[in-house]
Image: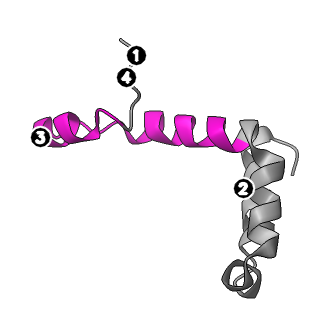
Amino acid sequence: GGRTVLQDEDSRQHAGEFNTLGALGELFGYVGRYRDEILTALERDVGCRKHKVRSKLEQVIGLVSGTS
């Protein structure tokens, strides 16, 4: 149906079948769709800047997209 992998997490956990790869696929779908907004927010956040979260996410995006 229209439910996402993350919405079905509870039922899958009870069955011991949480789909980690499916959840990661959805997560990176969101990152791909909202990349600029996410990177801007990470750059503006003091804690994220301190831990270089934007740079780390950009590295992961590069690995996932094969452009690193």
Report the amino acid beneath label 2: Val
The residue to which callout 2 is attached is 60
Residue 67 to residue 12: above or below = below
Residue 41 in sight here:
yes
Left or right: where does residue 66 sit relative to residue 25?
Answer: right
Dot 4 or dot 2, earlier in sequence: 4
Residue 62 in sight here:
no
Picture coordinates of residue 20, whole percent (x, y): 40, 42
The residue to which callout 1 is attached is 2
SS under mark 1: loop
The residue to which callout 3 is attached is 14
Image quarter where the N terminus lies is top left
Picture coordinates of residue 62, whole percent (x, y): 81, 50
Dot 2 or dot 3, earlier in sequence: 3
Picture residue at 80% right of the left edge, 74% below the top: 44
The residue to which callout 4 is attached is 3
Q: Which portion, as a residue range, is magenta?
A: 7-31
* Prevailing secondary structure class for the magenta stretch in the rendered image: helix
Picture residue at 73% right of the left edge, 36% below the top: 33
- The span from disc 4 to disc 2 (Cα, nearest Å) is 26 Å
Q: Are marks 4 and 2 in contact (CB under 8 Å)?
A: no
Report the amino acid beneath label 1: Gly
Q: Residue furthest right?
A: 67
